[in-house]
Image (cartoon, grey):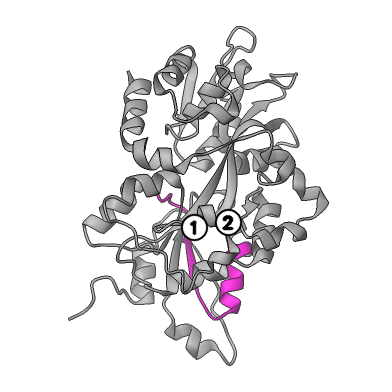
Amino acid sequence: MTNRFEISAPSRRAVLKGAAGLVAAPAVLGAGSAFAQARKEVVLVNYGGAAMKAFDEAYVQPFAAQGGRIVLDGSGPLNGKILTMVQSRNVTWDICDAGITTLAELGPRNALEKIDYSIVDKSKVPAEFAYENGVVNYMFSSVLAWDTAKVKETPTLADFFDLKKYPGRRMMRKDSQAMLELCLLADGVPRDKLYPLDVRRAFAKLGTIKKDVLYWNSGAESQSLMRDGECVMGLLWHTRANVLKAETNNRIAFTFKDGLLQPGLWVVPKGNPAGAEAFRAIASMQQPEGQVKLLAAMGNGPSNPAAQPLVPEALRATNPADPANAAVQAKIDAAWYIENHSKTFQSFLDFISS
């Protein structure tokens, strides 16, 4: 009987053909090509946009040089999509670019494979970010960005909530993660006193500007809202803010001050078609050289400590994990999210839609 999770490479590509921003690694030629063809392709899902080219250069091409094959899908690995695939026993993804909330929501539902640390090297990541069902892939931050054509001074998080001082629409992620922390920081909560989160206080702060907020779902959408001038300020991933800064010739600026430092995580959906090949791909992506390339392209902070000495001086300002930048940010508490995220997320959605 055919294994329902094993789909041949051609049919799998046909299934994914309509996925947003699909990018396939080139075939590996030469003496090892027969071996490469025998290995299963790995579908890695991210949030599209600029991340497609950046991931291709940092991760896809180096894995291809090792005889592997990664196909990028930019349609967005939302937790609900992953869960639906697993529950319907129709999994087409192998690796998802995820975060703490994915562990909180999908771990208890048995929707994630355990990371195979006999293949993935724990010594190449900070120990606190090597979880049972996920392993850090890069560091990122949620930060304040603004349109310098409309906001001449450097604003603070408190200014984000001051519509009289700076009129105009604001932008936030349609997710409680990081948005609640930034609400609380703007309301005067010290960075080292955030947890446990005072959710009511955060909602009260958000309520002061709720009618003027636009919400983004994907990283590409957050870029579009700021680039097109829909919002004068936004709370978004620093990686997207960094790309915006370059794309707009510094019209869009951002700051790490009072941001939230977070680990991006690789997670593997339960029953992924490529099986253990997904973990070999993750191990390949631990190479420090590729992580520095990703930092150069988008500002994702390297997760492998061995990469830090390789970071050029000019890139340290965009590295969220650089000591100078980390010192002015709050750090996410994964344990709080694993315990509280599901109920807090739903309350957040109810609040912003009311």
- Image height check: is 293 above or below 28? above
Please provide percent x and percent y for residue 189: 55, 21
Residue labelled with disc 2: 126
Q: Is residue 208 visible?
A: yes
Dots 2, 1 in contact, CB < 8 A:
yes
Q: Which residues are magenta?
A: 58-77
Residue situated in front as seen by the camera: 185 or 285: 185
Q: Residue drawn at (54%, 48%), measured in percent from left and top? A: 263
Q: What secondary structure is found at the residue carrying circle 1?
A: loop
Compared with 286, 237 (above or below) is: above
Mark-to-mark CA distance, 2 and 1: 7 Å
Q: Residues within 10 Å of mark 2 (few under 14, many from 20)?
A: few
Taking the spot 70% from the left edge, 19% from the top edge, the residue there is: 151
Query: Which residue is identified by label 1?
Result: 130
Pick the front one: 89 or 125: 125
Crowding at label 1, few (<14), some or many (≥20) Cα neighbours within 10 Å? many
- Which image quadrant for residue 27? bottom right
Mark 2: which amino acid?
Answer: Pro
Asked if the stretch drawn in magenta spans residue 73, the answer is yes
Instruction: Spot the residue most to the left.
Output: 1
Q: Is residue 311 left or right of residue 224?
A: right
The residue positioned 76% from the left and 56% from the top of the image is 311
Occupied quadrant, residue 89: bottom left
SS class, disc 2:
loop
Q: Residue furthest right?
A: 313
